[in-house]
Image (spheres, grey):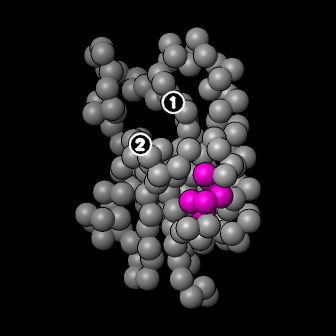
Amino acid sequence: KMDRTVVLVTGGSGLVGKAIQHVVREENGAKEGEEWIFLSSKDANLMDMGETRAVFEKHRPTHVIHLAAMVGGLFKNMKFNLDFWRNNVYINDNVLQAAHEVGTVKVVSCLSTCIFPDKTTYPIDETMVSNPLTFSQIKDQFSLC
């Protein structure tokens, strides 16, 4: 067993990241000895390898829940589909490389650029999306033990 468990959540200010943060901080979702760090785009530009390396060196995560992505909604995705694809490839590659370099034990990636409920009224905003993925489902897959 490891001496320390540091869980780094990229995309910590997004829809799923905020839900995980709520469970960890408000519902005692963390196990004893776990340190949870929630990154937003203000902490590092993950499209930049230097910034990605720096934030991984700073926190030295043992585990990563990778949720960060370039997002923008359906019409923006359609109009700039190549930009979205390329930028998300850069983000993913940088996160995986930096995780490897600092010896991260496990990375779980859960990425999406659009989410729409099947029954809704327009305009859609994040508060209208029901909880599609529970924290326990993520944590079960993650197996921090």
Is residue 143 among what the camera can see?
no
Q: Identify the residue shown where x is 61% and y is 67%.
A: 57
As helix, strand or loop, the secondary structure at mark 1 comes to loop
Name the kind of residue labelled 1 in the image: Val
Q: Identify the residue shown where x is 39% and y is 72%.
A: 30
For the residues labelled 1 and 2, the Cα–Cα distance comes to 10 Å
Q: Mark 2 and mark 1 in contact (Cβ < 8 Å)? A: yes
Name the kind of residue labelled 2 in the image: Gly
Q: Position of residue 47 (x, y in %)?
A: 63, 41
Q: Identify the residue shown where x is 30% and y is 70%.
A: 28
Q: Nearer the viewer, residue 93 or 49?
A: 49
Q: Position of residue 88 (x, y in %)?
A: 64, 36
Residue 14 has which mark?
A: 2
Relative height, residue 116 to residue 140 (above, below): above
Q: Position of residue 143 (x, y in %)?
A: 57, 69
- When asked about the image quadrant of residue 89, the answer is top right
Specify the quadrant that holds the N terminus: bottom right
Which residue is labeled 1 in the image?
A: 71
Q: Position of residue 114 (x, y in %)?
A: 50, 28
- When asked about the image quadrant of residue 121, the answer is top left
Neighbor class of circle 2 (other Cα within 10 Å; few <14, some 14-19, many 20+) is some
Neighbor class of circle 1 (other Cα within 10 Å; few <14, some 14-19, many 20+) is some
User: Which span is picked out in magenta?
Assistant: 51-56
